[in-house]
Image (tube, rainbow, N blue to C red):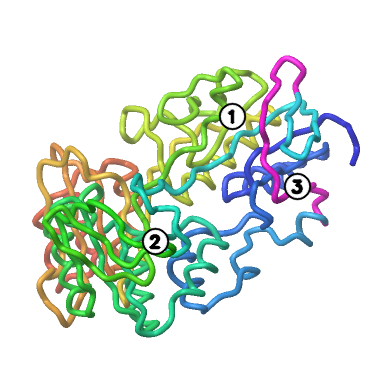
Amino acid sequence: MSEEAGIVILGAGQAGGEVASELRKLGYTGRVTMIGDEPHVPYRRPPLSKAYYAGLVTAEELYVVPLASLEKAEIEFIGGVRATHIDREHKQVSLEDGRSIPYHKLVIATGGRARPLPLEGADRPNVFLLRTIDDIERIRASSKPGARMVIIGGGFIGLETAAVALKLGLQVTVLEGLPRVLARVTIPEVSAFFERVHREAGVDLRTGAQVAGLEGDERITHVHLTDGSRIEADLVVVGIGLIANTELAESAGLVVNNGVIVDEYACTSDPDIVAAGDCTNHPSQYLGRRVRLESVPNAMEQGKVAANTLIGNKVPYHSVPWFWSDQYDLKLQMVGLSEGFDEFVVRGDLSDPNTRSFAVFYFKDGHLLSVDAVNKPQEFMLSKKLVAERARLNPQALTNEKVPFKTLIAEARA
């Protein structure tokens, strides 16, 4: 390996892969080295709890940039090794295998790791986190038909995993500590819809369920709740959030506060270091405040911004956040964040068990703030632009399903 100091990317996830690919697209010809603690090249994480767990796609089909493409683009990939130290004075990165990699510019795209369950017994071999390909391989090996799976956490990861596990023939219990599922991202009416869907499918879904402890010697056999319930378990899947991997940045003296602090150009407090993806805290023009987002679109767009910054282009990051989740035959797509809304209207019927299709429009001071769409792809796609421009609309005009959505938008603007 050449010792030429080029661009070093710490993190081989979606953001890191996007930076590397975009650098070559922009014409950068210097050395690019990407370092990841997993042996895999950059891959898409959203399908892990869905298509990959279900066995519908291979690991190779998840790869964003296959190894052959990396080699063709002359992007050096060092996988299965952790970076342990950033020496900003001498501009080099130390790896756990003893190597030191020099850099001219550095990218921190270290992402995040699954939050572990803070209980005794959480390290037993049948208690699983869900963040990586290897995590899913271990979960799949234990997902025998009839096995009793207990999922702790009723967010996207937990509900998606429950839907697939049920199809694989497992007996599934979902435990959500809050009074409703998806409480951090949507309104009670949408939470109630998804709770009903899962229960009707056969999931034992319990809200307000506080886990008190795990029972078992070599393997966990029961999950205890604070109300005295005792749930049998052959495997336990923990989906209670993400911890941003900011330790390297913090130990290097960069400014960190709920993520590595960056500006709209992905610049950190060091002029030779940029950052992108789940580990960053960036200013959001849409929100009017700083935010740390955990999403693929954010990682990709911020990765492109970082690549431009590295070669001297000034391209600000002003994207509106959006997310999606697939559960059974339902595709939930969300654009914007609904926090702070003062009015909402529904296009469709949340209670109709036959259509299972609706969109919720959130407003603040008459401006469209965000949209939650379930099996409403047109409403979602058209709303992305409307939310980005904070369009002023007549809320009630959007509720008439007999009129095409495109027509309604024109009427609602009037």
Of badges 2 and 1, the one in the foreground is 2
Q: Residue furthest top?
A: 89
Is 74 part of what is drawn in magenta? Answer: yes
Residue for point 30% across, 78% down: 171
For the residues marked 2 and 1, what is the alpha-carbon distance in whole angstroms? 36 Å
Along the viewing direction, whichever of 238 and 65 lies nearer the viewer: 238
Q: Earlier in the sequence, mark 2 or mark 1?
A: 2
Q: Earlier in the sequence, mark 3 or mark 1?
A: 3
Please tell me how crowded label 2 is: few (under 14), some (14-19), or many (20+) other residues with Cα within 10 Å: few
The residue type indicated by label 1 comes to Leu
| Residue wearing tag 2 | 217
Residue for point 27% across, 58% down: 154
Query: Residue 327: image x %, image y %?
Result: 33, 71
Q: Is residue 177 above or below residue 279?
A: below
Q: Is residue 111 left or right of residue 67?
A: left
The residue type indicated by label 2 comes to Asp
Q: Is residue 54 visible?
A: yes
Residue for point 13% across, 58% down: 228
Please tell me how crowded label 1 is: few (under 14), some (14-19), or many (20+) other residues with Cα within 10 Å: some
Along the viewing direction, whichever of 39 and 236 lies nearer the viewer: 236
Q: Is residue 369 left or right of residue 249?
A: left
| Residue wearing tag 1 | 248
| Residue wearing tag 3 | 78
Q: Which residues are magenta?
A: 72-91
Q: Is residue 409 left or right of residue 67?
A: left
Q: Residue furthest front?
A: 217
